[in-house]
């Protein structure tokens, strides 16, 4: 009865929902990100990425152990020079959260002049990511994940800080707002949870924070580039949701189970196959997983996102007396472990939307501040008038910085910005 019961109506609906919506064939950033270390012409990016995907699909991971760096996993290694920065250059590039990039660049101007020149081709390709509209992982037939060098994509932040430090102020401001727009767009239209979180980090922890630091040194009369308006436009549901990323996670996990796990089981001794068939049902596990992932795509979740209400952590539902678990004990255990695992990712996406709103409020304050009233009072009033929920802000460091109350509470992720305009 347990084996033959089939999926419930809820599971059938969730499985249908987890089918990825088609995206345009043009505008996918995955090939450009995967080959970011190589000066590959744009016309060749897709063909090389497809060849690499075929290599991954045909080569088990244990055969890849000799490839100590990701770059050697690409067929581009044979025809194009690897422009990955050296270890010394890696240490000089700014990291997204750990440091003040402006201070780091100003501490050694000559060294950063040379750094930017040595890596100019790579940094141009990073800036070129602004041409793409979405991120769709295309190597779906591979059991081993093709992870692009996302870290290289974050090095554009250093060039923006370098431009500002050397006096190219307008170019730096435009670069920061373009960076927010790029990663806001790619993150919101990504089928990868990793790419989604990286988009959040680069757009908010990276470019938005750097923009605030630069504006704190400029008079309020300094005009902003037009791109800043769209960079900090009110967040839509796509900015706050991880639905598309969860569809991608479901697709990858389902493929891995069906191709890799079942393949290993088929090669096992008969006794292992017999036991496996008694405790694991791939179709029922897939249906239960779909329900977990589809929760992030529901109308109720979207309503919570629009009202900026924290999504509740789902509780464990493991019950060995459930009929569906009788013939799928292992699947029930696996899905029960996964059930609460994605809550923090959703909170981080919601926090990200609030970060965009706080930055927009600061930009409003920069333009409309009353010189006869404390900035803290004016910002608080603006925030309370425009925020979507009950999320608060507080002023720290003697009132010179504003800090956002976040759902994902981590000491290393405190998000604070200098008050604008500068004094």
Image (spheres, rainbow, N blue to C red):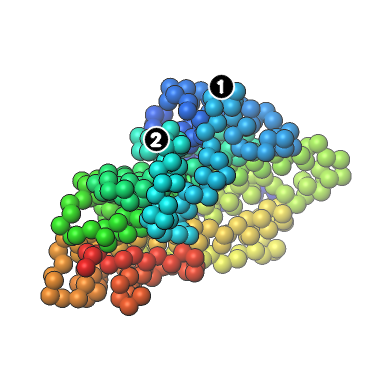
Query: In this view of the protein, can residue 349 be seen by the observer?
Result: no
Q: Marks 1/2: CA distance?
A: 20 Å
The x and y percentages for residue 85 are: 52, 39
The residue located at (49%, 65%) in the rendering is 412
* Residue 79 marker: 1
The x and y percentages for residue 407 are: 43, 67
Q: Residue most toward the bottom?
A: 398
The x and y percentages for residue 212 are: 30, 59
10 with respect to 228 (left or right): right
Q: Can you tell which quarter of the image residue 221 is in?
A: bottom left
The residue located at (81%, 43%) in the rendering is 273
Task: Give the vertical position of 368 relative to 136 (above or below).
Answer: below
The residue located at (71%, 42%) in the rendering is 261
Residue located beneath label 2 in the image = 124
The x and y percentages for residue 91 are: 53, 50
Q: Can you tell which quarter of the image residue 378 is in?
A: bottom left
Q: Secondary structure at mark 2?
A: helix
Task: Give the vertical position of 259 relative to 193 (above or below).
Answer: above
Which of 104/295 is in front? 104
First reached walking from the N terminus: tag 1 or tag 2: 1
């Amino acid at each position: 009865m347990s084996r033959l019961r089939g999926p419930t109506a809820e599971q059938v609906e969730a499985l249908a929902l987890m089918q990825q919506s088609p995206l345009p064939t043009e505008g996918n950033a995955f090939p450009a990100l995967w080959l970011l270390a190589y000066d590959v012409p744009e016309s060749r990016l897709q063909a090389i990425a497809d060849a690499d995907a075929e290599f991954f699909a045909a080569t088990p991971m244990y055969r890849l152990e000799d490839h100590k760096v990701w770059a050697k996993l690409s067929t581009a290694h044979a025809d194009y020079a690897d422009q990955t920065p050296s270890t010394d250059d890696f240490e000089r590039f700014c990291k997204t959260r750990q440091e003040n990039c402006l201070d780091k660049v100003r501490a050694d101007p000559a060294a950063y002049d040379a750094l930017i020149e040595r890596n100019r081709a790579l940094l141009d390709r990073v800036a070129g990511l602004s041409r793409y509209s979405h991120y769709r992982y295309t190597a779906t037939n591979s059991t081993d994940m093709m992870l692009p060098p996302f870290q290289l994509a974050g090095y554009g932040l250093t060039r923006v800080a370098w431009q500002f430090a050397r006096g190219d102020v307008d170019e730096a401001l435009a670069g920061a707002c373009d960076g927010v727009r790029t990663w806001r767009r790619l993150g919101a239209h990504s089928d990868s949870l990793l790419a989604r979180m990286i988009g959040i980090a680069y757009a908010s922890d990276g470019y938005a924070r750097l923009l605030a630091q630069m504006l704190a040194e400029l008079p309020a009369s300094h005009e902003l580039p037009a791109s800043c308006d769209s960079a900090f436009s009110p967040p839509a549901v796509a900015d706050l949701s991880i639905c598309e990323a969860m569809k991608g996670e479901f697709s990858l996990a389902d493929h891995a189970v069906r191709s890799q796990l079942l393949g290993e089981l088929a090669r096992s001794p008969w006794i292992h196959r017999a036991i496996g068939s008694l405790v694991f049902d791939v179709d029922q596990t897939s249906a239960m997983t779909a329900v977990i992932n589809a929760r992030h795509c529901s109308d109720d979740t979207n309503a919570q996102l629009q009202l900026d209400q924290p999504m509740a952590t789902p509780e464990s539902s493991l019950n060995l007396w459930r009929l569906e678990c009788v013939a799928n004990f292992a699947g029930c255990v696996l899905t029960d472990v996964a059930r609460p695992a994605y809550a923090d990712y959703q909170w981080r996406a919601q926090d990200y939307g609030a970060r965009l709103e706080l930055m927009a409020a600061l930009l409003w304050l920069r333009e409309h501040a009353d010189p006869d009233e404390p900035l803290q009072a004016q910002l608080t009033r603006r925030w309370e008038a425009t925020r979507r929920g009950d999320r608060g802000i507080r002023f720290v460091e003697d009132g010179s910085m504003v800090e956002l109350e976040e759902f994902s509470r981590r000491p290393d992720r405190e998000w604070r910005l200098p008050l604008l305009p500068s004094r």
